[in-house]
Amino acid sequence: TQLLEQSPQFLSIQEGENLTVYCNSSSVFSSLQWYRQEPGEGPVLLVTVVTGGEVKKLKRLTFQFGDARKDSSLHITAAQTGDTGLYLCAVIHTGGFKTIFGAGTRLFVKA
Amino acid sequence: GAVVSQHPSRVICKSGTSVKIECRSLDFQATTMFWYRQFPKQSLMLMATSNEGSKATYEQGVEKDKFLINHASLTLSTLTVTSAHPEDSSFYICSARDNTGGRNTIYFGEGSWLTVV
Protein backbone atom coordinates (compact mmCIF):
# COMPACT_ATOMS: atom_id res chain seq x y z
CA THR A 1 0.00 0.00 0.00
CA GLN A 2 1.32 3.39 -1.02
CA LEU A 3 1.82 5.91 1.76
CA LEU A 4 0.60 8.66 -0.58
CA GLU A 5 -2.16 8.03 -3.10
CA GLN A 6 -2.29 10.45 -6.00
CA SER A 7 -5.14 10.92 -8.43
CA PRO A 8 -5.60 11.03 -11.27
CA GLN A 9 -2.60 9.09 -12.52
CA PHE A 10 -2.81 10.68 -15.92
CA LEU A 11 -4.52 13.81 -17.18
CA SER A 12 -4.69 15.16 -20.71
CA ILE A 13 -6.37 18.54 -21.11
CA GLN A 14 -6.58 21.47 -23.51
CA GLU A 15 -4.67 24.64 -22.95
CA GLY A 16 -6.74 27.07 -20.90
CA GLU A 17 -8.59 24.47 -18.86
CA ASN A 18 -8.40 24.14 -15.11
CA LEU A 19 -7.43 21.00 -13.26
CA THR A 20 -6.97 19.62 -9.77
CA VAL A 21 -4.61 16.89 -8.63
CA TYR A 22 -5.12 15.13 -5.32
CA CYS A 23 -2.78 13.54 -2.81
CA ASN A 24 -4.32 11.45 -0.05
CA SER A 25 -3.12 9.40 2.88
CA SER A 26 -4.42 7.80 6.04
CA SER A 27 -1.40 9.19 7.89
CA VAL A 28 -0.96 12.62 9.41
CA PHE A 29 2.05 14.63 8.31
CA SER A 30 3.83 17.62 9.76
CA SER A 31 4.38 18.89 6.23
CA LEU A 32 3.85 17.90 2.63
CA GLN A 33 5.63 18.88 -0.53
CA TRP A 34 4.76 19.13 -4.20
CA TYR A 35 7.34 18.59 -6.91
CA ARG A 36 7.28 18.88 -10.67
CA GLN A 37 9.50 16.73 -12.84
CA GLU A 38 10.19 16.99 -16.54
CA PRO A 39 11.43 14.00 -18.53
CA GLY A 40 15.10 13.28 -18.00
CA GLU A 41 15.48 15.71 -15.14
CA GLY A 42 15.39 15.61 -11.37
CA PRO A 43 12.27 16.72 -9.49
CA VAL A 44 11.96 20.41 -8.67
CA LEU A 45 10.34 21.52 -5.44
CA LEU A 46 7.27 23.72 -5.98
CA VAL A 47 6.00 24.21 -2.46
CA THR A 48 5.97 22.94 1.10
CA VAL A 49 2.76 23.16 3.10
CA VAL A 50 2.96 22.94 6.85
CA THR A 51 -0.23 24.09 8.54
CA GLY A 52 -3.59 22.28 8.35
CA GLY A 53 -5.88 24.21 6.02
CA GLU A 54 -3.00 26.20 4.59
CA VAL A 55 -3.34 27.56 1.06
CA LYS A 56 -0.31 28.64 -0.95
CA LYS A 57 -0.30 30.19 -4.37
CA LEU A 58 2.45 30.09 -6.95
CA LYS A 59 1.26 32.10 -9.97
CA ARG A 60 -1.47 29.90 -11.52
CA LEU A 61 -0.87 27.04 -9.08
CA THR A 62 -2.81 26.81 -5.81
CA PHE A 63 -1.79 24.30 -3.17
CA GLN A 64 -3.92 23.33 -0.21
CA PHE A 65 -3.11 21.24 2.83
CA GLY A 66 -6.07 19.44 4.38
CA ASP A 67 -7.30 20.53 7.79
CA ALA A 68 -6.28 17.17 9.25
CA ARG A 69 -2.92 17.26 7.46
CA LYS A 70 -3.63 13.95 5.74
CA ASP A 71 -4.25 15.20 2.23
CA SER A 72 -3.41 17.94 -0.21
CA SER A 73 -4.49 19.27 -3.56
CA LEU A 74 -2.87 21.14 -6.41
CA HIS A 75 -5.08 23.27 -8.61
CA ILE A 76 -3.85 24.75 -11.86
CA THR A 77 -5.80 27.58 -13.43
CA ALA A 78 -5.76 28.15 -17.18
CA ALA A 79 -3.22 25.42 -17.88
CA GLN A 80 -0.47 26.11 -20.39
CA THR A 81 1.55 23.70 -22.50
CA GLY A 82 4.53 24.51 -20.30
CA ASP A 83 2.71 22.95 -17.35
CA THR A 84 3.13 19.51 -18.93
CA GLY A 85 5.07 17.22 -16.64
CA LEU A 86 4.93 14.79 -13.74
CA TYR A 87 3.53 16.23 -10.52
CA LEU A 88 4.56 14.45 -7.36
CA CYS A 89 3.46 14.92 -3.80
CA ALA A 90 5.95 13.89 -1.17
CA VAL A 91 6.58 13.78 2.54
CA ILE A 92 9.78 13.70 4.50
CA HIS A 93 10.09 10.75 6.85
CA THR A 94 11.07 12.38 10.13
CA GLY A 95 13.01 9.33 11.27
CA GLY A 96 15.61 9.39 8.55
CA PHE A 97 14.81 12.55 6.59
CA LYS A 98 14.16 10.50 3.49
CA THR A 99 11.65 11.85 0.99
CA ILE A 100 8.84 9.48 0.08
CA PHE A 101 6.95 10.20 -3.12
CA GLY A 102 3.45 9.48 -4.28
CA ALA A 103 2.92 7.65 -7.56
CA GLY A 104 2.62 10.93 -9.42
CA THR A 105 0.18 12.55 -11.81
CA ARG A 106 1.31 12.82 -15.39
CA LEU A 107 -0.15 15.97 -16.92
CA PHE A 108 -0.25 16.66 -20.64
CA VAL A 109 -1.53 20.03 -21.79
CA LYS A 110 -2.41 20.20 -25.46
CA ALA A 111 -2.14 23.39 -27.48
CA GLY B 1 22.57 26.59 -10.65
CA ALA B 2 22.49 23.02 -9.44
CA VAL B 3 23.64 22.43 -5.89
CA VAL B 4 23.63 18.66 -6.32
CA SER B 5 25.38 17.28 -9.36
CA GLN B 6 25.31 13.77 -10.77
CA HIS B 7 27.82 12.21 -13.11
CA PRO B 8 27.50 10.80 -15.65
CA SER B 9 24.18 12.10 -16.88
CA ARG B 10 23.94 9.22 -19.32
CA VAL B 11 25.80 5.93 -19.44
CA ILE B 12 25.54 2.79 -21.51
CA CYS B 13 27.19 -0.36 -20.29
CA LYS B 14 27.35 -3.97 -21.34
CA SER B 15 25.43 -6.62 -19.48
CA GLY B 16 27.55 -8.15 -16.72
CA THR B 17 29.74 -5.12 -16.16
CA SER B 18 29.64 -2.66 -13.28
CA VAL B 19 28.93 1.03 -13.53
CA LYS B 20 29.46 3.82 -11.02
CA ILE B 21 27.31 6.93 -10.64
CA GLU B 22 28.50 9.90 -8.60
CA CYS B 23 26.44 12.35 -6.57
CA ARG B 24 28.13 15.52 -5.37
CA SER B 25 26.87 18.33 -3.16
CA LEU B 26 28.43 21.48 -4.56
CA ASP B 27 27.79 24.21 -2.00
CA PHE B 28 27.34 22.33 1.24
CA GLN B 29 28.44 19.29 3.14
CA ALA B 30 25.97 16.45 3.24
CA THR B 31 26.21 13.76 5.88
CA THR B 32 23.16 12.14 4.37
CA MET B 33 22.38 11.48 0.74
CA PHE B 34 19.65 9.39 -0.83
CA TRP B 35 19.48 7.26 -3.97
CA TYR B 36 16.31 6.75 -5.98
CA ARG B 37 15.43 4.71 -9.03
CA GLN B 38 12.74 5.74 -11.48
CA PHE B 39 11.45 3.47 -14.22
CA PRO B 40 9.67 4.99 -17.23
CA LYS B 41 6.28 6.46 -16.44
CA GLN B 42 6.69 5.71 -12.75
CA SER B 43 7.51 7.65 -9.62
CA LEU B 44 10.78 7.84 -7.72
CA MET B 45 11.39 4.83 -5.52
CA LEU B 46 13.85 5.20 -2.66
CA MET B 47 16.63 2.65 -2.83
CA ALA B 48 18.86 3.58 0.07
CA THR B 49 20.08 6.23 2.45
CA SER B 50 23.78 6.99 2.13
CA ASN B 51 25.45 7.92 5.42
CA GLU B 52 28.86 9.58 5.48
CA GLY B 53 31.37 7.42 7.28
CA SER B 54 29.04 4.49 7.85
CA LYS B 55 27.11 1.83 5.98
CA ALA B 56 24.20 2.74 3.80
CA THR B 57 20.69 1.86 4.88
CA TYR B 58 18.80 -0.01 2.18
CA GLU B 59 15.07 -0.07 1.62
CA GLN B 60 13.26 -3.37 1.70
CA GLY B 61 13.76 -5.37 -1.47
CA VAL B 62 16.90 -3.54 -2.60
CA GLU B 63 19.94 -5.81 -2.90
CA LYS B 64 22.83 -4.21 -1.07
CA ASP B 65 25.40 -6.42 -2.79
CA LYS B 66 24.13 -5.38 -6.19
CA PHE B 67 23.81 -1.67 -5.50
CA LEU B 68 26.97 -0.67 -3.66
CA ILE B 69 26.89 2.72 -1.99
CA ASN B 70 29.96 4.52 -0.74
CA HIS B 71 29.75 7.88 1.04
CA ALA B 72 33.44 8.47 1.64
CA SER B 73 33.37 12.24 1.95
CA LEU B 74 30.94 14.94 3.03
CA THR B 75 30.32 15.98 -0.57
CA LEU B 76 30.34 12.72 -2.50
CA SER B 77 28.27 9.56 -2.56
CA THR B 78 28.63 6.90 -5.23
CA LEU B 79 26.26 4.21 -6.39
CA THR B 80 27.80 1.23 -8.15
CA VAL B 81 25.50 -1.10 -10.02
CA THR B 82 27.36 -4.40 -10.07
CA SER B 83 26.90 -7.07 -12.72
CA ALA B 84 24.37 -4.89 -14.45
CA HIS B 85 21.57 -6.46 -16.46
CA PRO B 86 19.07 -4.90 -18.89
CA GLU B 87 16.42 -4.82 -16.15
CA ASP B 88 18.68 -2.43 -14.21
CA SER B 89 18.24 0.13 -16.97
CA SER B 90 16.59 3.08 -15.30
CA PHE B 91 16.86 6.73 -14.28
CA TYR B 92 18.85 7.01 -11.06
CA ILE B 93 18.43 10.16 -8.98
CA CYS B 94 20.24 11.24 -5.85
CA SER B 95 19.38 13.85 -3.25
CA ALA B 96 21.40 15.41 -0.47
CA ARG B 97 20.36 16.83 2.85
CA ASP B 98 21.70 20.23 3.84
CA ASN B 99 21.43 20.52 7.61
CA THR B 100 24.08 23.16 8.14
CA GLY B 101 23.31 26.28 10.14
CA GLY B 102 19.92 25.03 11.26
CA ARG B 103 18.73 24.36 7.74
CA ASN B 104 16.96 21.15 6.80
CA THR B 105 16.67 21.21 3.05
CA ILE B 106 16.77 18.39 0.53
CA TYR B 107 18.25 19.06 -2.90
CA PHE B 108 17.85 16.68 -5.83
CA GLY B 109 20.34 15.96 -8.57
CA GLU B 110 19.59 16.04 -12.25
CA GLY B 111 19.51 12.27 -12.57
CA SER B 112 21.58 9.69 -14.44
CA TRP B 113 20.23 7.53 -17.23
CA LEU B 114 21.61 4.00 -17.19
CA THR B 115 21.11 1.76 -20.17
CA VAL B 116 22.39 -1.80 -19.97
CA VAL B 117 22.73 -3.54 -23.32
Image (cartoon, coloured by chain):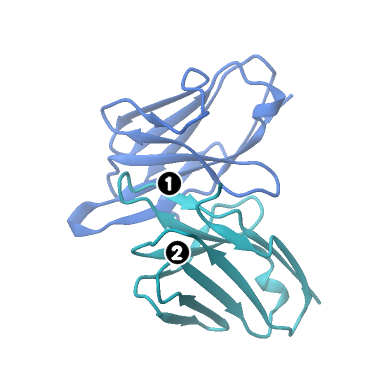
Chain colours: A cyan, B blue
| Residue A99 visible in image | yes
Q: Chain of mark 1?
A: B
Q: Secondary structure at mark 1?
A: strand
Q: Residue at x 53, y 49 (%)?
A: B110
The three-letter code of the residue at mark 1 reads Ser
The three-letter code of the residue at mark 2 reads Gln
- List x then y, in percent, for residue B100: 21, 53
Query: Which residue is label 1 attached to?
Result: B95
Q: Nearer the viewer, mark 2 or mark 1?
A: 2
| Residue B1 visible in image | no
Q: Quadrant of the C terminus of chain B?
A: top right
Q: Which mark is residue A52?
A: none
Q: Secondary structure at mark 2?
A: strand
Query: Which residue is label 2 attached to?
Result: A33
Q: Residue at x 52, y 28 (%)?
A: B61
- List x then y, in percent, for residue A33: 45, 64
Q: Chain of mark 2?
A: A
- Please tell me whether residue B36 is drawn above or below residue B21 in the rendered image: below
Q: Residue at x 48, y 48 (%)?
A: B109
- List x then y, in percent, for residue B104: 28, 56
Do marks 2 and 1 share a chain? no
Query: Quadrant of the rendered structure where residue A30 is?
Result: bottom left
Q: Residue at x 37, y 46 (%)?
A: B96
Q: Residues within 10 Å of mark 1 (few under 14, many from 20)?
A: many
Q: Quadrant of the N terminus of chain B?
A: bottom left
